Amino acid sequence: MISFAWPWAFLLLPLPLFARWLLPEATAIQEAGLRVPSFAGFRMLAGRRPSEQLINWRVWLAAAAWILLVVAAARPERVGDELDVPVSGRNLMLAVDLSGSMDQKDFELANRRVDRLTATKAVASDFISRREGDRIGLILFGERAYLQVPLTLDRETVRILLLEAFIGLAGEKTAIGDAITLAVKRIHEGEGDGGEQVLVLLTDGANTAGEVEPLKAADLARQVGLRIYTIGIGADQLEVASVIGGRRRINPSADLDEETLTEIAELTGGRYFRATDTATLQEIYDLVDELEPVEEPEAGFRPVKSLYYWPLGGAFALSAVMALVSLLLGLRLRYRVKELRHAG
C-alpha cells in the first residue's frame, strides 16, 4: 500500500499558476536585426522555425517535473503487511564500573592474565548477545555516571559500545550511588514501559564519589520497582613480587564493600554475587540469564519503506532533458544564422 507522510504538500501543485497570474509579464526582448544582401537565405530557412508544438511540449515537460517534485515533497511510502513482533516485558540495565582499580590484572582469559574490565567485557558481551527480546541499556560509571546507551532492542549496539569503553573514561573514583540513581531516573522518566525492571551493577570497590549514597539510591530503586543484582569483582588473593625479593600474597579486593553491595541487592529484591575469576563471573551472568521475562502481547508492526527518491529522480531527469533541449535549440539557431550568412 502506497501512502504519503506529508499529503498537505499537494497544496503546492497550483503554485506555478498563481505565480503566472500574480506576477507581471516579462518585457519582450527586442531582437536585433540581421543584415543580408538578398532574400535567398530566407527562402532556404523557410519552414524551419520552432513550432508551437515544440514550445507546448517544453511547457508540459516542465509541468511534469513540478508535479514530480511535489510528489517527492509529500514523502511517498510503501507500507508493508502487519508483522507480529514479540516484545519482552523486561527492561535490563547494565552498570559497569570504569574506575582506576578495574585496571588490576587478577583475571585470566584464554590462558593469559587480563585486567578486570577486559574480563567483564568478554563475559558481559556474551550475556548481552543472548538477551533476545529484552530492552537493554548501558550505564558506565566512575567518578560520575553516564548513560551510554538508553534502553533498546538493538543488542549489538549495546555490545559494541561496551567493548569500546576504557578504564578512566568516567573518572578514577567510584560513584555507585549515582549509577543507581541514573538508572532510577531513566525508569521514572518513562523509559521503562511498566514491565519488569532489572539493574545488573558490577563494581570492584566501594562508593568513594558521587552525590547520592548507595543505600539511599537503592531505596529509590525499590520505590520504582527496580530490582538490583550486584556483582563484586576481584580476586581474593594475588601473588606479587616483594621489594625484598621473592613473592608475597596480597588481597587485591581489600577495598570491595561487599556489605553495602549485599544490602543494595536485598533492599531491592535482588541478589549479591562475588566474582573472583572469569569462570565465576561467567556463572553469575548465566544465573542472571535464567531470569524469565514477563511476556506481553505481541505488538503489530508495519514496515515502511520511503519512496521519495523515485519522483525526485524523475524530476531531475526531466530538468536535465529540458536543459539539453534548450542547449540543442541554441546550437541549432546559431547554425541557422551561419547558414543564412553563407547564403548571402
Image (cartoon, rainbow, N blue to C red):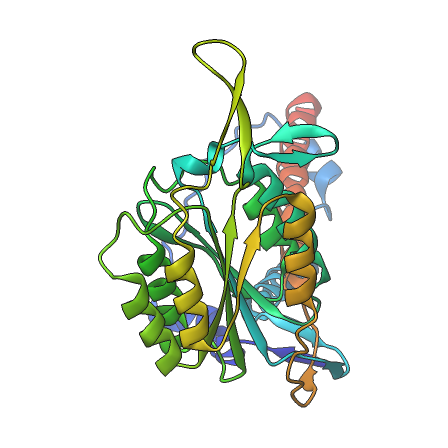
Given residues 323 and 304, the one toward you in this image is 304
Quarter of the picture holding the C terminus: top right
Q: Is residue 221 left or right of residue 34?
A: left
Residue 262 in view here: yes
Residue 21, located in which quarter of the rendered image?
bottom left
Query: What x and y, as percent, mark residue 309?
Result: 65, 59
Given residues 62 and 186, the one toward you in this image is 186
Query: What x and y, as percent, mark residue 138?
Result: 50, 57
Query: What x and y, as percent, mark residue 133?
Result: 68, 72
Total numbered labels? 0
Q: Is residue 173 above or below residue 137?
A: above
Q: Is residue 194 left or right of residue 124?
A: left
Furthest-left residue in this view = 211
Which residue lies at the image location 62% right of the left edge and 66% below the top edge? 153
Quarter of the picture holding the N terminus: bottom right
Residue 39 in view here: no
Which residue lies at the image location 69% right of the left edge and 56% below the top edge? 283
Query: What x and y, as percent, mark residue 264?
Result: 40, 67
